[in-house]
Amino acid sequence: PECGPPIAPTAASFKQPDLIADLKTYFNALQAIATAKDAQTFDTAVQALSSSVANVAKAAGASASIQSAPTVFSTIAQTAVQKAQYNAMRQYIPAMDQLLAEAAPAITTALREQQAFYITLVTNDAKDGMSFLNKLYQSKGVAKDPASALGIYTATAPIIEEFQAEQASVRTDPATAVSALLAAHHALAQALQSNKDELSAIVATVTGISSSVQTLITAPATTSQTVSP
């Protein structure tokens, strides 16, 4: 605030960069398409996928022209869901693959922006938690009772380890992970171009990538609720 004391950031106070939110929508929709069991689920997922591809293109300022496929929606009722799944992925994944290559610098920058916020968040989390624990360790009751002190140290060791894990998790530059994501997505796009309707293998790959990317684009959990009087 312009006036008054600074307010400590919270997870709820942070707005995820639009580009990262759109990327998350893309991978969620991609997985939903791959696992759709009926036409309605498929239609909903394809619409989300189409919108996310267009939004990523806009947010990243990419030059690629992303075309939607209205015919997919009009023919799904007459087409087997599995065939429609495959056709939709063959259209959108290669389109997004070209887009990701252009958007990689913007994606990395957005992830670093998100990471900078969470570095502050987990640092404050650890500071507050350790302040409480130190007061507990130094309390007269604990100091006079070695058995209680040992029990408290043992019980709080996992909390301290979690603080350390939080610190480590937000201090890794996302650029390496973005490169790995692009490589995996490109391999998927190439497999779709050469694949002959082997949907099960494609679904397994889509599910694997979509699950892995959540770690990259989702905010880390904090231990703020773990340490309390």
Image: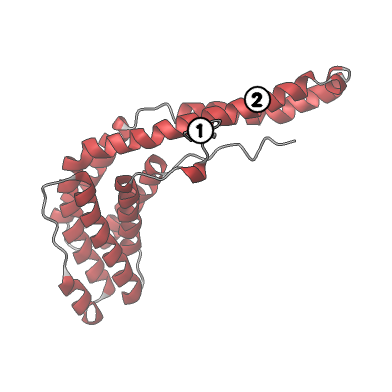
User: Residue 93 got which mark?
Assistant: none
Classify 212 as above or below 227.
Answer: below
Q: Residue at x 53, y 40 (%)?
A: 10
Q: For the C terminus, which image quadrant?
A: top right
- Find residue 140 and report its image quarter: top right
User: Residue 130 got which mark?
Assistant: 2
Q: Position of residue 162 (x, y in %)?
A: 58, 31
- Can residue 217 be seen at all in this image of the molecule? yes
Q: Residue at x 23, y 61 (%)?
A: 50
Classify 20 as above or below 152.
Answer: below
**As drawn, is 74 to the left or to the right of 19?**
left
Identity, as a three-letter code, of the amino acid under mark 1: Cys
Classify 129 as above or below 82.
Answer: above
Classify 92 as above or below 227.
Answer: below
Using the image as rendered, state which of residue 54 and residue 172 is in the foreground: 54
Using the image as rendered, state which of residue 213 and residue 83 is in the foreground: 213
> Crowdedness of circle 2 by 10 Å Cα count: few (<14), some, many (20+)?
some
- Residue at mark 1: 3
> How far apart are the two marked residues, 1 and 2, measured between alpha carbons?
29 Å
Q: Secondary structure at mark 2?
A: helix
Q: Residue at x 51, y 33 (%)?
A: 3
Q: Position of residue 26 (x, y in %)?
A: 30, 54
Q: Residue at x 60, y 36 (%)?
A: 223
Q: Position of residue 126 (x, y in %)?
A: 59, 28
**Do the CB atoms of the residues marked 1 and 2 lie less than 8 Å apart?**
no
Image label count: 2
Using the image as rendered, state which of residue 210 and residue 187 is in the foreground: 210
- Find residue 142 and report its image quarter: top right
- Can residue 198 be seen at all in this image of the molecule? no
> Crowdedness of circle 1 by 10 Å Cα count: few (<14), some, many (20+)?
few
For marks 1 and 2, the one nearer the N-term is: 1
Q: Secondary structure at mark 1?
A: loop
